[in-house]
Image (cartoon, rainbow, N blue to C red):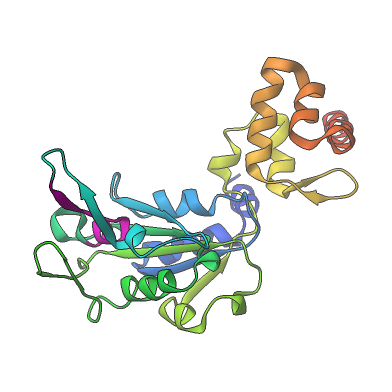
Amino acid sequence: MILEEQDEMGQCWRDVADVLAAGIDRLVLYGPPGTGKTYAALHFGVAVGVAERLVCTEDLTTGEITGTWMPAGDGTWRWREGPAIRAWTARGGRGGRLVVDEVDRASGDALSTLLAMTDSIDSARWRNPETGSWVTPGPEFSVVMTTNVEDLDELPSALRDRFAVQLRVDRPHLDAVALLSEDLRAPALAGSIGEEARRISLRSFYAFDQLRLHYGATRAAQLVFGDVRGSGVLDALRVAALS
């Protein structure tokens, strides 16, 4: 039974577990969307409450990474640290986890700042504009970046150089699949359903599973997958149930 579960889990998740257990503090998870890369980055190998998440967009600014001045109630301005600095200094300075989602979308100044924030612990430092003091990442600071690209050459070479371990995640984790109704677990692990075998993200399976409790399978399939594709999903589930 254990061997069967390991086979279902897939080599990718065993690799992720081994890398994090070994204390690797720079990791890239890439591959198709909806497989739980962000969830793993936020929860695997990190203490509760010490993971900071940063979602990259084309408009991401340096202030959203390191921090910015914010108005205080007394008419003054105070510095509010961003997720990168909070992760650097979490747990009394020991450091926490910084999760950088969709890193391929970062550009310009934001990318330069991310390079500085993810540099080696021995090299990285940042000056607090409010106190003027230098801040460095704690000894247990780690970074996990996620991206949906399939070709890592799409990422800047300077960024890839900081992350020696780059793992492709191609299927959901068993723990995530176990949250679904039993009839959806096998297709969710496969990541596709029906003869066309078009990829369906784990988020879509979750939504379908929840909606059919309220409105039935037909209506749920229409809402999540559309009229045409929804019919195919329902047919595939009926065939799977019979077999």
Give coordinates of residue 240: x percent, y percent.
84, 34
> Relative to 13, is 117 on the left or the right?
left
Query: Residue 68: horizontal and vertical position, in percent?
Result: 26, 57
Task: Give the position of the N terminus as an image quadrant.
Answer: top right
Instruction: Please tell me in which quadrant of the rendered image residue 161 appears.
Output: bottom left
Q: Position of residue 142 (x, y in %)?
A: 33, 64
In the shown orientation, is residue 238 left or right of residue 36?
right
Q: Quick check: 202 above or below 27?
A: above
Residue 84 drawn in magenta: yes
What residue is at 43 percent from the left and 72 percent from the top?
A: 111
Q: How many marks?
A: 0
181 drawn magenta: no
Q: Residue 229 versus residue 29: which sits nearer the camera? A: 229
Residue 62 at x, y percent in the picture: 35, 65
- The foreground one among 182 and 55 is 55
Could you tell me which quadrant the C terminus lies in? top right
Residue at 21 percent of width and 55 percent of height: 90
As displayed, is residue 134 above or below residue 11?
A: below
165 sits left or right of 191 in the view: left
Residue 226 position by quadrant: top right
Q: Which residues are magenta?
A: 76-88
